[in-house]
Amino acid sequence: MKIEPKIMSQVKSILGEFGNKYLTSKGSLKRNNVINDLDKFDRELMTKLFKDPLIHKNYVEKIADTEVFKLNQFIEMFEYKEFWEDSYTKYTNKIGLTANGKFVDESADVVLDFPFKDTVLKAGMTKEDLDNKDVPANEPFLNETIAQPEIDELLEPKIFVNTKKYDQSGEHKISSYSGQDNLIIKGNNLIALYSLKEFYTGTIKSVFLDPPYYFEINKPSDTFSYNSNFKLSSWLVFMKNRLEITRELLSEKGTIFITMSDEGVHYLKVLADSIFGFNNFIADVTWESRASVSSDGFISLNSNHILIYAKDLNQINKNDFRLSLDKESFKFNDNDGLGQYRIEPFDAPNVRKNLEYAIVNPNTNKTYFPPKGRHWRTTEKEFKKLLKSGRIKFGSKGKTRPQLKAYYEDIKDAGKGKASTTIWHDISVNNSISWLNTNTNTSATKHLRQIFGSDVFTNPKPEDLIKRILELSTDKNDIVLDFFMGSATTQAVAMKMNRRFIGIEQMDYIKTVSVERLKKVIAGEQGGISKDVNWQGGGSFVYAELMEKNQGYLKDLLAAKDMNELDIVYKRMKVGADFDFRVDLDKYENDAERKALSFEEQKQLLVKLLDKNQLYYNFNNIDDADVRDLISDKDYQFNQSFYGKRD
């Protein structure tokens, strides 16, 4: 095939306008990125290409008074790899993985690919939603191109109902929402996240997720109350959909922490790299989540991974990404009126000539210089002030090199201590960040048992784990999001640490476990981290439910116990439900074969008739007469406040 360099040069110039999205810093083509966006008809890219005179002349044809972009022919140009080779990269002094003769980090040709990658999967969380299959009953993978109207409908902001506020004086009906409120939402988390988009985009400081784990096969250790045995491709779509909107909600200084088991973490790592960017990856922490030994497999799996990403690593000050200051480490006191202090080295990494001066130990007259490759922490003038004020120590007997006496009162306002490590298995002293014995999932279960008097939730995360994560990633009043809320550990810890929070949970135990736990936190319960943070109770949160449409019928169908109950639900569905566009109700009612099916088979057939994109009512329909009559005045006002104009 003949290649015209002028067109190639022009295309490369246009791609360069998008920064490093399509070209590396060395000018190498990120071919996969370009082809993917062309396949998806990326509006901005296609517009720039279409408007270029040279490209328009060669790749646009007028058919029936309509201009058609010859996309397939255009894409062929990018598949002609020889033109795009930066041959010098083959001969530079570099070792690494290559694909088609180019380094992976330059060509971006190696990516995580999987069936239905560019689709949307609502994915109900209840095991009943599965219909004994790997994808929720009759739930389609909605393609982003051919099913865009259905996706738009699915992800439209939804109506909130049953809104109320809980505080120390009890439960209250409310008619407005403030940006300072804590928020708990009952409903499908993907749909709820998009309902948060207008209010919270760019405001979330930290996200903690304990999502369904991917298992190659069902295991006894799969004890989640919700579904956690997706097949790999479905699971990747499920996670991709939710991580993409999460990134939009994160602030520029925001971070996300995702727990995962061995089987899924490596797929998740590559997926998260593609969404948050490899350069924004912070760490893969190993957390010892179980102390006991299990005989389930060849090796007892006692740890989980916690993947940590920043939205923009350049926006995060590493000195802020620290554990909280531990007063216990300030164990010395000279009774000089200055209080407790700890000993820190007086030297620091790197070499700075203005900080390389001689220090004489006044007790021994021995002279010290900074160790090789290091410098003193202050200027000589500042050192003399510290020495005069008694803040320099020369060892416990006064005979060694200089040390700094760091007083708690001097640095407590900074609120940050040491950096974390990537191994979390023991929490004791020196700002360690790990869990052993008392702070595994087992201890967290005991904590809930103390609160409720029985086992109400399996495998909750310990409060210490969340506390450490929030110490690293947030300050007071920052917003924390967890949309796999479970037993509300994240929200409980956020409240005790004076952070704001958002929690989302679809399962019905949100009322009997999650909300009830937070009510006990408000009342001052003393489990978990309460004593560590001197928690005395207080706080509040708003509770709201996505207004069910077909979701309500779906629940009623699944709850039906006999044909009579099933028939009652169907009659109600005929009046108010939205059916799949392929459904012919006359044929359904008169189908003799259908009538011969068993009760369970007829139940599942009715489930399949429902339009799964109409599970909840859209906010833009709130003033429709048949919808408005179903909503209380206070709920109506709450929605107007949440989606309307705000200060």
Image: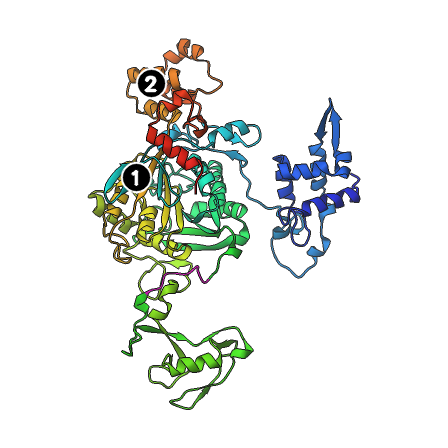
Point out the image quarter for the N terminus. Answer: top right
Name the residue nearer the viewer: 585 or 641: 641
Q: Is residue 273 above or below residue 413?
A: above
Residue type (three-letter) at the residue carrying disc 2:
Val
Residue type (three-letter) at the residue carrying disc 1:
Lys
Q: Which residue is mark 2?
A: 569
As drawn, the label of residue 539 is none
Point out the image quarter for the C terminus. Answer: top left
The residue positioned 54% from the left and 46% from the top of the image is 274
Q: Secondary structure at mark 1?
A: strand
Residue 63 in magenta stretch: no
Q: Is residue 121 visible?
A: yes
Q: Is residue 530 above or below residue 561?
A: below
Q: Is residue 482 above or below residue 433?
A: above
Q: How many numbered discs, if any? A: 2
Residue 320 in magenta stretch: yes
* Magenta highlight: main SS: loop
The residue positioned 66% from the left and 49% from the top of the image is 23
Boundaries of the magenta span: 319-326
**C-alpha gap between disc 2 and disc 1:** 32 Å
Q: Secondary structure at mark 2?
A: helix
Residue 629 found in image quarter: top left
Q: Residues within 10 Å of mark 1 (few under 14, many from 20)?
A: many
Q: Which residue is mark 1?
A: 165
Residue 76 image point, x, y percent: 71, 37
Residue 321 image point, x, y percent: 44, 59
Horizontal side of residue 380 vs 331, given as left or right? right
Horizontal side of residue 151 vs 101, given as left or right? left
